[in-house]
Image (tube, grey):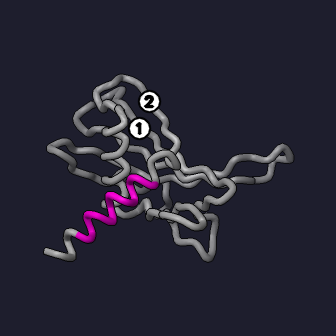
Amino acid sequence: MSRRERAPRRLVADGHVYLWSLRHHHDTAPDGRPSHCRETLTLFPQEAGPGRTALRIVFAEGPGRYVPGGAPLGSGDVGHVHGPDLNLHEPGAVRALLDEALARGWQPGQHRREEIDGWTLLEAAAAALDARRSEAADS
């Protein structure tokens, strides 16, 4: 099954159901060849219906940052070269990013698409995910 054929996944957070998907993109260089990689995590409330609001969290390749572009990185891995990282295929990582976007003012009821630079959310989301994992291990 190709990436385009995959159905969005479900995430339940605070009584709301969100659908989410992850896509890998390449920017195009002036000569037409693929260049920089981007990972785009898209979330939208399931109950929003047609014309629903979408939140796109974009991680673009850049200095000191990595997104998957082949070996040795795993699919969905994004992070700082010497810092926190997340695997965007993990529901816990998606939930941490959603929680951080909500805390910073994203409102699922809006009738427009919003795009956020994922790097602005990464450190807080990774810290929250680590804290959840530590609490679960201590239980």
Q: Is residue 73 left or right of residue 36?
A: left
Taking 41 as reference, is 107 left or right? left
Considering depth in this image, is 90 or 97 the residue closer to the camera?
97
Work out whether 18 lies above or below 111.
below
Give the mark nearest the N terminus, 1 or 2.
1
The part of the chain drawn in magenta is 123-134
Identify residue type, mark 2: Arg
Mark 1 lies on a secondary structure that is: strand
Q: Which residue is mark 2?
A: 113
Query: Residue at point 61% right, 59% down?
Result: 65
Residue 97 image position (x, y, % from top left): 37, 50
Image location (x, y in percent) of residue 7 = 36, 53
CA gap, disc 1 and disc 2:
6 Å
Q: Residue furthest right?
A: 31
The residue drawn where x is 36% and y is 64% is 90
Tell me residue 48's x, y (percent): 26, 31
Write the residue at 86% across / 47% down: 31
Tell me if mark 1 has few (under 14), some (14-19) or many (20+) residues whose alpha carbon lies within 10 angstroms of its own.
Answer: many
Q: Amino acid at mark 1?
A: Leu
Discs 1, 2 touching: Cβ within 8 Å: yes
Q: Which residue is mark 1?
A: 55
SS type, badge 2 = loop
